[in-house]
Image (cartoon, grey):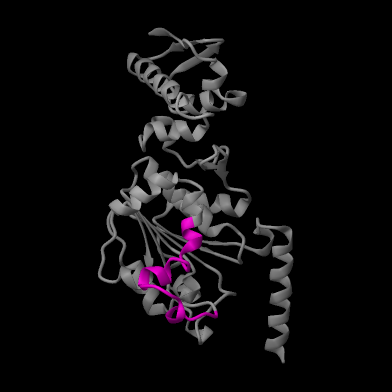
């Protein structure tokens, strides 16, 4: 069928977005629908269901615009609240966009290794991502988890870290256990805060949809219909890593990230990350992605700093 949607009492640019980015994001949810926008009229050609749903979403965007200054592609994502469409089920490798941040800025794979990690996630249930600081391992993992939650591919996001101090003693920090651990888990909060509005994130955490906890809290649980991310896995011993991996339930995705050069355990030989990878890497459904210094996406100085420390450590080991 053919249908014309007229935008009344509003500037079309406010709905289409700069460079039509908002309109294009909306059209991405309707791959079978032909959409042509001319001024304040949008011409549709497709199934009756698609035309009706598209008109409904346009109305919701107009209502949303009346309550905020500018619309972004993120507003389109939020409209669908986790729904899926035939055009959005595949891995986002065409333009490398994983999800849109709060300001509408697309979060995408920024180099080949990150793209490999995204692809591995869609093709496997367990992904190890190992490499130096600043390569975006944890950030990409959380973006993939948020994407899955938005599309209701999962019911929960669970983020965990081993409670190992990096040169500090948790016992001397003020407050109860949560107060002591929250600063240590702050990088996970920061990444989530880039992708989920603060109020919604608080709601998700209160409802248990998003959970952030130390690794010890995983013992005895079966984690199904969830994307579970173990960060700083280099600070686990082999027994802890086994405990974590065996928590995997049905319809779950596990991502393990770590940096073997930043082990904070008293005896670095106790780290189970590389040992664990060597034990499971040939199992079907497991993928191992290795980042290098060239993949660092932070300030250019970071890669030089990493190399300087690696050189010094090698010299110390020789002596």
In the displayed image of the protein, which residue is found farthest to the front?
174
The residue positioned farthest toward the bottom in the image shown: 319
Give yes or no for residue 182 being in the magenta stretch: yes
Asked whether 27 falls inside the magenta stretch, the response is: no
Q: Position of residue 91 (x, y in %)?
A: 47, 42
Q: Nearer the viewer, residue 73 or 47?
A: 73
Question: Can residue 251 be spotted in the picture?
Answer: no
Quadrant for residue 93, please give it.
Answer: top right
State whether residue 96 is above or below residue 251.
Answer: above
x, y percent for residue 226: 33, 53
Q: Which residues are magenta?
A: 167-189
Residue in view at x 69 percent, y 64 percent: 302
The residue at the point 43 percent across, 28 percent down is 29
Choose between 236 and 81: the one closer to the eye. Answer: 81
* Res 255 → quadrant: bottom left
- Give x and y (percent) for residue 186: 48, 62
Residue 274 in the image, given as x and y percentages of width and height: 50, 74
Looking at the image, residue 208 sits to the left or right of residue 71; the answer is left
Q: Quadrant of the N terminus?
A: top left
Residue 35 vertical position relative to residue 256 in the rendered view, above or below: above
Residue depicted at 53% across the width and 27% down the height? 22
Residue 172 sits above or below residue 142 on the image: below
User: Which image quarter is the C terminus in?
Assistant: bottom right
Q: Residue at x 54, y 59 (%)?
A: 137
Q: Please indicate, yes or no, whether residue 319 appears anywhere in the rendered image.
A: yes
Q: Is residue 28 left or right of residue 115?
A: left
298 vs 12, left or right, is: right
In this rendered view, identify the residue nearer to me: 88 or 279: 88
């Amino acid at each position: 069928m053919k249908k014309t949607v007229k935008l009344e009492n509003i500037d079309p640019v406010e709905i289409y977005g700069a460079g039509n980015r908002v309109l294009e994001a909306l059209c991405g949810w309707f791959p079978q629908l032909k959409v042509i926008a001319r001024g304040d009229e949008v011409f549709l050609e497709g199934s009756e269901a698609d035309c009706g749903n598209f008109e409904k979403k346009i109305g919701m965007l107009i209502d949303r615009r009346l309550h905020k200054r500018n619309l972004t592609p993120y507003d389109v994502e939020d409209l669908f609240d986790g729904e899926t469409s035939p055009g959005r089920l595949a891995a986002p490798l065409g333009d490398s966009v994983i999800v849109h941040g709060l300001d509408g800025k697309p979060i995408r794979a920024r180099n080949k290794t990150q793209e490999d990690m995204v692809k591995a996630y869609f093709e496997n249930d367990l992904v190890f991502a190992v490499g130096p600081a600043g390569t975006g391992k944890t950030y990409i993992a959380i973006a993939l988890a948020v994407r899955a939650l938005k599309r209701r591919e999962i019911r929960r996001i669970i983020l965990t870290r081993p409670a190992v101090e990096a040169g500090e003693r948790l016992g001397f920090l003020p407050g109860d256990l949560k107060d002591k651990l929250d600063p240590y888990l702050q990088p996970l909060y920061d990444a989530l805060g880039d992708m989920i509005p603060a109020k919604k994130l608080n709601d998700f955490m209160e409802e248990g949809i998003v959970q952030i906890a130390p690794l010890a809290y995983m013992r005895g649980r079966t984690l199904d219909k969830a994307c579970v991310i173990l960060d700083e896995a280099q600070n686990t011993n082999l027994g802890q890593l086994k405990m974590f991996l065996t928590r995997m339930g049905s319809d779950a995705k596990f991502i393990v990230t770590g940096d073997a050069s930043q082990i904070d355990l008293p005896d670095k030989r106790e780290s189970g990350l590389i040992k664990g990878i060597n034990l499971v890497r040939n199992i079907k459904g497991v993928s191992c992605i290795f980042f290098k210094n060239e993949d660092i996406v932070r300030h250019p100085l970071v890669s030089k700093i990493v190399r300087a420390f690696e050189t010094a450590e090698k010299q110390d080991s020789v002596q």
